[in-house]
Amino acid sequence: MRDLRGKTAFITGGASGIGFGMAQAFIEAGMNVVIADIREDHIADATRFFEERQVRNFKCLKLDVTDREGYARIAEEADAAFGKLHVVCNNAGMGLGGNIKDTTFDDWDWGIDVLFKGVVNGVITLLPYVLKHGEGGHIVNTSSSAAVLPGGSIYGACKSAVLSLSEGMANDLAKDNIGVTALMPGLIKSNIHQSGRTRPDKYRGHTRALEREKRGESREISPLWMEAKECGEIVVQAIRDNQLYVLTHVEYKPMAEARYAKILDAFPKKEPNPELWADWNRRMQAVNPDAPRRG
């Protein structure tokens, strides 16, 4: 989707950090922007930022991405705000770290509900609005560099799932002229260290992470980290180029290369059977014509 001017984008977690960087970049590209965020203070800051610059083609809405009924209501507002919805950015998330030995079901449930199911909720709720006008569009799912690096526990597992989801979506939506980008950012200036503030009470009963999350709020943001708006500008170009994979930091490349080298080396040391994929493709196409071809 080369021409973004006049198109409308919907961004979750759009009032701060990477999401707000996207919002700024989209506005500069001539787009209308609907910002959805769970934090009212961030919504107030984003609103003030654009109003001070006399920007009118934006709308801010409060949204918890785990609330499917609320998502449905917000989707109607977003679609009505500026007309056709072309770009959806499933960006809302939080930082949830810690050793696997210290995690609990409450931690996993919160992480999965926001980091993975929050993306699924956005896709299932908003994709019909992109499909209905028939003009194509683009979906950006914020994964993480953690998806291609070793380790990660809750955060890495969920971000890896977002990457895999995005790859499948790219195949499924290509015929509809809807591109997909898996954004895998590295160190970006954001408020992710304040994630503990948004942990709902239902995920606080059995967790050992509250003290760690409180300490994390004092983490300093390095001047060496990427500005969120620069990340947003990278996303704009990725949409124009229909780029599936987007990584923001070359510094992660050696670690990713080492990981994938080990994976490739783990394959059996024998010649492949040339008939295997032909047989697989024939069987899969018989039951699902849209299944991706292998081999």
Image: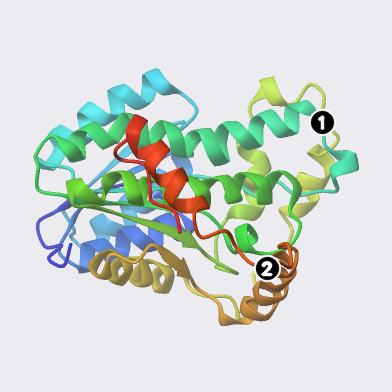
Q: Are the two marked residues, 1 and 2, in contact with CB atoms closer than 8 angstroms?
A: no
Residue drawn at point x = 18 percent, y = 46 percent: 176
Q: Amino acid at mark 2?
A: Leu
Q: Is residue 100 shown left or right of residue 93?
A: right
Q: Residues within 10 Å of mark 1 (few under 14, many from 20)?
A: some
The image position of residue 294, as x and y in percent, is: 44, 54
Quarter-wise, where is residue 284 in the image?
Answer: top left
The image position of residue 227, as x and y in percent, is: 48, 73
Quadrant the N terminus occupies: bottom left
| 22, above or below 45, in the image | below
From the viewer's side, name the closer residue of 186 and 164. 164
Residue drawn at point x = 63 percent, y = 81 percent: 251
- Residue designated by label 2: 264
From the viewer's side, name the closer residue of 128 and 36. 128
| Element type where label 1 sits in the image | loop
Tell me if I can see residue 42 in this picture: no
Tell me if I can see residue 84 in this picture: yes
Question: Mark 1, mark 2: which one is toward the viewer?
Answer: 2
| 84, above or below 269, in the image | above
Q: Earlier in the sequence, mark 1 or mark 2?
A: 1
Q: Is residue 241 shown left or right of residue 133?
A: right
The span from disc 1 to disc 2 (Cα, nearest Å) is 33 Å
The image position of residue 63, as x and y in percent, is: 41, 32
- Residue designated by label 1: 104
Q: Residues within 10 Å of mark 2 (few under 14, many from 20)?
A: few
Residue drawn at point x = 34 percent, y = 71 percent: 233
Q: Amino acid at mark 1?
A: Thr
